[in-house]
Amino acid sequence: MRTVDLIRRKRDGEELSGKEIAFLIDGYTQGVIPDYQMAAFLMAVFSNSMSEREVGTLTECMLHSGETIDLSSVPGVKVDKHSTGGVGDKTSLISAPLAAACGAIVPMISGRALGHTGGTLDKLESIPGFRTNLTVDEFREQLRMYGLAFMGQTAEVAPADAKLYALRDATATVESIPLIASSIMSKKLAEGLDSLVLDVKVGSGAFLKKQVEARRLAQIMVTIGRRADKRVQALITDMNQPLGFAVGNALEVMEVSQTLQNAGPTDLTRLSLELAARMIYLGRITMTLDDAREMATSKLLDGSGYRKFKEVIQAQGGNANVLDRFDLLPNATGVREITSPRNGYISGIDAECIGQASGLIGASRDTKEDTIDPAVGMILEVKVGQKIDQGAVLCRIYYTREDNLDGAAQLVEDAFRISSNPPEERELILEVVG
Ligand code: URA
């Protein structure tokens, strides 16, 4: 078998066999197939997509490229939640503690920010002392003690994905349904979970811009999960504006704290509660989804989710007092206000522009080697649909360095669309798949 022949066949839209896909993934993971050939193959997949059978095989090969985590010694149904990536999306830090406070076991293996989207690990690491590099033994022990642990992907779990994802990021091949589905599901199936709630984002701030594409991605991931005997559901949710008001690591932790104390933005609270309810239901804590919704809401209102998050921060070496004292988090040194050029209604806030602007001032990375400035980001002062007067503040940019500030400010200005009539209301939760 020759790599070049497989690239050519995929370039010409042919379906590859299981053996051929295994040849490519094994060869690439072991360093036998070079980056330039894999990059060409990824671009061929990006252009011609893959059949469901091919995506299933690709996922299997990536899953078996490394070790799987054995959580069988931890009692209870293990349920995780994963988002395909968005801007201001801090729901994991809210729904996971809420689900754990209801008795679910949540082994959360999360990713870092890349491109214009944020990453749960970077948000957590903005909390002084917080350790995300737990060993698998520590991870298991913490799950036994608290029902919730956060950690990063280890080098042993789905190593093919780590290598492929870095290459995709550098070759403009991230936004591909078969590649996203196999990337997410290979990691999740390696985690030792029983159930999974997927949040498939769609819109300007998501990798997929059209609902029909998001639906196909959700259907493929749900099918892959079910074939592996997991209980999987996917929500398709709107990412045409940032979720909540805060974008940027420490700023998002502050918003998480407010939300867990029932003083957060409406959209963020609503989506976090729905995701938590589905985790609770798929985790078999309640018999019905309605009971799960009620339970999640009660744990928000009585502060159990908030206390659970504090407990877990402390268990992972972090300073849990940051949730009450925001001055203990990294804080920016400067603020620039972006104001409205006219009267009207906010008809759009381009989430990708906001994500890119946050990245420019240091909230995310261009390459995996870049470091993040945990203090910087944006706080939106308005959401889509709101009436606005000329000169009113649309957004505050929190920065520590002025290098790219003008560029970021321009992007933020461009992100806001103002119309003379109120825009049509858009649903946050668009569809449920599975
Ligand atoms: N998240 C992942 O883990 N992989 C992708 O390809 C996209 C989002």
Image: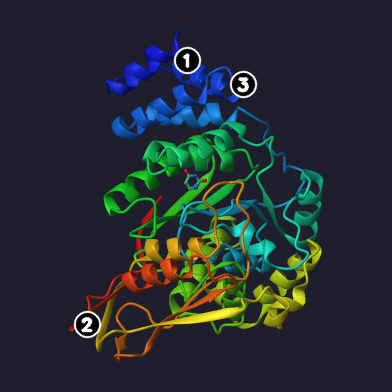
Which residue is pictured at 69% across the width and 41% down the height?
Answer: 154
The residue sitting at the top extreme is 1
Q: Mark 3 points at which residue?
A: 30
Which residue is pictured at 57% across the width and 43% down the height?
Answer: 188
Q: In which quarter of the image is residue 388?
A: bottom left
Q: Mark 1 points at which residue?
A: 19
Specify which label sits upstream in the sequence, 1 or 2: 1
Decide: few, some or many residues near mark 1? Use Cα within 10 Å; few <14, some 14-19, many ≥20: few
Task: Determine the CA span between mark 3 and mark 1.
Answer: 16 Å
> What x and y, as percent, mark residue 101?
67, 68
* Residue behind label 2 places its C-beta within 8 angstroms of ligand 1: no
* Residue 226 in view of the camera: no
> What x and y, as percent, mark residue 324?
70, 83
Query: Which residue is more in the foreground, 256 or 54?
Result: 256
Q: Name the residue under label 2.
A: 422
Decide: few, some or many residues near mark 2? Use Cα within 10 Å; few <14, some 14-19, many ≥20: some
* Residue behind label 3 places its C-beta within 8 angstroms of ligand 1: no
Query: Which residue is more in the foreground, 101 or 381?
Result: 381
